[in-house]
Image (cartoon, grey):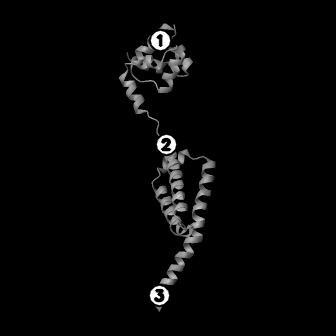
Amino acid sequence: MRIGDQLQKQRKLHDMSQNELADKLNISRQSISKWENGATLPSFSNVIAISDLFGVSLDELIRGDEELMNKFEDDKIRLSKTETIFTVGLGIVLIGLIIIYSGGISIASIDNWLPDVGLISFFCFIANINWRMFNKSLNKKAVFFGILLLVAVLVPFIMHGVPDLLKGFTEGTNLYNK
């Protein structure tokens, strides 16, 4: 039996109108109508709320509705892109630190190339952002912390990178002059 038919059956068993059910679920009556007619499917959270409201098991409510079962299968829990950046990034940091400290790698050797990788990654990240969507999502605090992040990334790079770069240029020109 489809979820819409099961919903209508349970609603009528409990002597409830579509309006009353909609009020209890904090949704529109049109949503209830669309579910019962099979035009749309309820979200998983709404199915749970319906199950609780009518005192029926989820199994009883959704068994036999292949379309709904497939929808729930497609709604697997996935990390958002931001969560992926932080989760994978922190994981790489931890693995990297374990390798660095257990492998006896000197911090100085890491300091030579890591700021360059960070700066290149930062600019590649910036170049691949959908700015129209990004700008809509920023509030004043995010802008403030974004500025701090940019400063925190650029200042050390400029302090270390530019003198090293200039030193390399002057040493290179001295080699040609000799």
Q: Amino acid at mark 3?
A: Leu
Query: How far apart in space, not on screen, are marks 3 and 2 (Cα)?
Result: 52 Å
Label 3 secondary element = helix
Q: Amino acid at mark 2?
A: Ser
Q: What residue did someone put label 3 on?
A: 175
Label 2 secondary element = loop
Choose the circle earlier in sequence order: 3 or 1: 1
Q: Position of residue 78 (x, y in %)?
A: 46, 39
Q: Is residue 70 above or below residue 11?
A: below
Q: Contact (CB < 8 A) between labels 3 and 1?
A: no
Q: Position of residue 60 (x, y in %)?
A: 44, 16
Work out whether residue 20 or residue 53 is closer to the camera in this orientation and state it: 53
Query: How far apart in space, not on screen, are marks 2 and 1 (Cα)?
Result: 36 Å
Tell me: 127 left or right of 67: right
Q: What residue did someone put label 1 on?
A: 10
Q: Is residue 20 above or below residue 156?
A: above
Q: Contact (CB < 8 A) between labels 3 and 2?
A: no
Mark number, residue 80: 2
Query: How far apart in space, not on screen, are marks 3 and 1 (Cα)?
Result: 88 Å
